[in-house]
Image: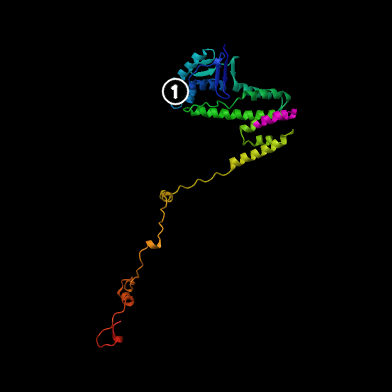
Amino acid sequence: MSRLAISALGMPRIEYAGAPLAVDRRKAVALLTFLAVEGRAHGRDALATLLWPGYDQSTARGNLRRTLSTLHTALGEEWLAIDRDTVALKTADGLSVDVREFERLLAECGAHGHSADQVCPRCAEPLRQAIARYRDDFLTGFTLPDAPEFDDWQRQQTERLRQLLSGALARLARGLVEQGDTYAALAHVRRRVALDPLDEDAQRQLMQPWRGPGIVARRCANTRRASNCYAAKCKPRPRPRRPRCPRRSAKISSPRRATPHLSRSMLPPFSPIPKSRLCTTTHPRHCRRRGPRRPAATSGRSPSCAPG
């Protein structure tokens, strides 16, 4: 049986018989990775709904049948177990899945007869191998835009594996500190902080009193970096500015016209306003009171008897 190696930590990579698998369909890569990570048989209807949710059942099953035919042509009959209702990936000695190896190495540390948070001298080597196998996050750069359920499963696997890696880094760092290898332990703690800068447990482990030349200055720098990270993440967001009124903004943005300077020679000559035009009201009473006096009558009446 030819060797089949499926690498899902990082960019997906599938090798068959020592050469990259010649598959030009992303759904085929997704289906093979899903079967390899799950490690059990799945129904045809469930796989069709997972990878082709926007199609009816008959069309989705037809697409699944063509994808299985593509994988069957590339791998042969030795790796796929296909029947009328279920599909599975056979488990044999020639199968290598990096996610399973990562989980197996971590589970090996739990068989040493101590609790999960303790570290014994035999745990160091399996933890180192498990951390070395974690090249990058699960299926980095791979996505299926038309399969949201597959994206949800990929996101859950990514978060689960990141938590396992964080726990492995913390345990290996504690074991190295007990052995006196402070610098190697500090490197693993920094990688743990880089996974999630807001992880308080990882930040506390990074800021603990490490012993060694030059480590005190590094611890102070790590403390300042953590404070800046929390301040940047937790500061209140600025309120959005209200949009200006279009008229007002147009009025403000329009350039102002320059007022011309008028010299005294440009002004018209001054002409005094006659007294007869000073009355601005139209009421006859006010016109009689404020208008010019009428000349006295020429009759024999006295001026005091003249009408006012």
Residue 232 locus on image (x, y percent): 59, 41
In-front residue for pair 51/142: 142
- In this rendering, would 188 be left or right of 11? right
For residue 293, which quarter of the picture? bottom left
Q: Residue at x 60, y 27 (%)?
A: 161
Quadrant of the drawing holding the N terminus: top right
Quadrant of the drawing holding the C terminus: bottom left
Q: Name the residue under label 1.
A: 60
Q: Which residue is drawn at 46% across and 20% down?
A: 64
Residue 8 locus on image (x, y percent): 57, 23
For residue 57, which quarter of the picture? top left
Residue 194 locus on image (x, y percent): 62, 32
- In this rendering, would 195 be left or right of 305? right
Q: Is mark 1 on a helix, strand or loop?
A: helix
Is residue 103 a member of the stretch shown in magenta? Answer: no
Is residue 185 a member of the stretch shown in magenta? Answer: yes
Picture layout, residue 299 above or below residue 159:
below
Report the predominant secondary structure element of the magenta stretch: helix
Q: Which residue reaches farthest front?
A: 265
Picture layout, residue 243 above or below residue 208:
below
Magenta segment: 176-190
Q: Which residue reaches farthest left?
A: 299
Picture layout, residue 219 above or below residue 18:
below
In-front residue for pair 95/116: 95
- In this rendering, would 172 be left or right of 283? right
Query: Is residue 118 visible in this depiction of the protein?
Result: no
Q: Which residue is drawn at 62% across and 23% down?
A: 133
Residue type at numbered disc 1: Ala
